[in-house]
Image: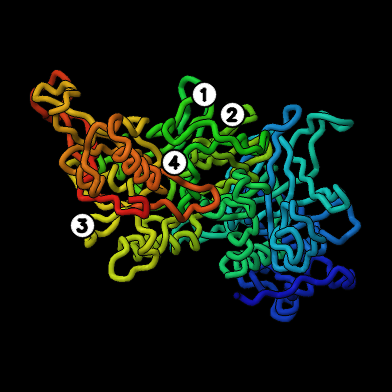
Amino acid sequence: AVPVRAWPSADASDHARGSLRSLLGPRLAPGGVSDRASRVAGPPEGARNLRFSPRLPRFVGSNRSPVMANYHYMSLHQAWVTNQKLVNIYGVITRVDIPRPCSGTDYKQRVWVTDQSARDISFGGGADDDEGGGGGAAKDVMIMFFGDRDALLTNAREGDIVRIHRLEKREWQRRPQFVAKIGVIRSGAAAGGVARCHFCLFRGLPSAEGDVLPEEPFQTSSQKYTFNVTDRANVKRLRELVSSGSFRDAALDNPFTVPISSITHLDPKKTHHADQYDLHCKVLEVITNPETGRTTLVVWDGSDSRPFPPGVTNLGPSGGGLESQSSVNDVSPFGGVGEYPAFFFAPFEPERAVTRELVEKYEKDRGPIPKYGSAFPVVMRNFDIAKEDMPSRGAWIRLMKLSSWVREGQRQGLFTQHSSWAPSQPNPSFQEAYSERLENNDVAMWAPRGIEWEGRDGAPNGKNTLTKTAHAHVPLSTLREVLASPAPSRHRVAVRVVGHYPKDVHDFCSTSNEGGETNSSENAEWSYNLSLVLEDGTARLKAHLAPPESSAFFHGVPACDLWESSVTYDRVAAKTKALVEHHIDRPHEGWVVVCLMSYLVPNEGVRKRDKKHPGTRCFQMFGTSVVGPHA
């Protein structure tokens, strides 16, 4: 960490605390020399005929006030413990909300700041603390800003430095609360007046490597502002803090921030998170339903969302109870219907004929398609979405105070009236973890360890292997990679089977004559014809099973009329149950490895495929057999 000078303590003498003069050294006279040196050497050459005031340094910039006030700045720790009602502070922004409408015409904005003294603040505990971590040492302090939307810190980002004059200190729930009213006062006894609180924003980090940080603030709450040697030293000192590891700890190590894979609860039967949580993630897409106007943020951090049985649906924080609204046979391949259905985002629809040119154009416009990691839907609800700013696609953001529910086996985030989001920088820890997944080809975080070995060569969990393939040497892929690959293509994937068609196992077998019509005569040849709904952490799709591959899939069980043969039906039903049976408290079970191929089918009425009529993409399983414990 970069060594920094300590702030003067709250009980230091007035001389030691005044304008931090004891820390900053002797005052600089015009020309950049100290008062002491100027008394010895006299005025600089060429300036002997000019008249300087030793108390009024020369300024550059028309917005700097020609009158200098002597402001006493407190550290955050001093501001926390002082009895003064108005304080002046400097701080580094660790988080900043997007302005949200509040009662009346004002907007509110939460800004978290830190400095070298913040770790000395004790919040006194409490799991719901917005600052620190619910007990122990603090990392940042929250400030509530109120004012017109355009007057707030709309251009601020993590690492910026904020200077606030006349910040109001109040008490809320027996704790200090800092409030900054900016601009015109809209209500109360002072309505019509102008708030006395003002701020300046300085860049703490360069926008690009090699850029020189300007001394001037990039945003101010008033046309004129003061800036002297004390301010210059404070900005320099905090820029050193921003470039140190301690700032990264304060900005990234938020105890409420969890990866998508860790949105869990100690009670697995309770499928919504008991406490609110934060995400630090990248926005893959912002989707607004044209019919309902409802917006869904699709976010990603490189981890996989926890899987649930496909029939599980709950009401989230409002209802809380666990429901099983549908059976496994009612699950939709790509999400259900209703007001809040399951939603599986994919860069390309499963039936779309994907080409290399289409993939290249997509990645050029929207960035690289991540191979691994769930596209986590965050449903916006319980407030006027028209008044909420939405993040842009590809941006890293923080989502704060989210809740969640489960819809048809898919966990979804809930953006409620208590939630907020803030622009952010990429999370280095999450990026490193994702790079490690790529290096290890860890396609499914919730699958059992060693699943890629399919029980061969003494691999772990070999006794619990449900399927084996004829292509165990092929590296595993995710379903998102399958969907982003032009047809024809072949892949080996680790998935869960979450549904099947036909819904009744009795109908898995059928007969067909040359015309394609079903023939139920006794002498007809029976074969398995069905579809399975496959799911991993990245997508959900429907894959067909047709002869001759379907015969190998139901290994050792010849196809026949399952309505007539109860023995054969029991064997097929047992294999099917082993595939589709999932337990809410055992998310690592029920995973299988299958081989999957894609192909194109000409559209109806089109004799020959071409670029204008490429056809419909379909998926079929091959080279896979069920050898599970129920075989």
SS at circle 1: loop
250 to the left or right of 533: right
Left or right: residue 159 versus residue 373 is right
Contact, mark 1 vs mark 4 (Cβ under 8 Å): no
> Sequence order check: which comes first, mark 3 or mark 4?
4
Which image quadrant is residue 434 in? bottom left
Identify whether 402 is placed above or below 205.
above
Q: Give the number of callouts.
A: 4
**Looking at the image, which residue is at 60% across and 75% down?**
1
Amino acid under label 3? His
Q: Position of residue 166 (x, y in %)?
A: 81, 50
Query: Which residue does the numbered mark 4 point to in the structure image?
Result: 393
Q: Nearer the viewer, mark 2 or mark 3?
A: 3
Position of residue 627 in the picture relative to residue 395 (left or right) = left
Q: Earlier in the sequence, mark 3 or mark 1?
A: 1
**Label 4 residue SS:** loop
How far is mark 2 from mark 1, CA to CA?
Answer: 9 Å
Q: Are marks 2 and 1 in contact (CB under 8 Å)?
A: yes
- The amino acid sitting under disc 1 is Gly
Q: Which mark is residue 293?
A: 1
Residue found at the very far bottom of the displayed protein: 40
Q: Position of residue 512 (x, y in %)?
A: 15, 26
Residue type highlighted by circle 4: Arg
Residue underneath mark 3: 471
Q: CA distance from mark 4 to mark 2?
A: 17 Å
Sequence-first tag of 2 and 3: 2
Front position in the image: 101 or 193: 101
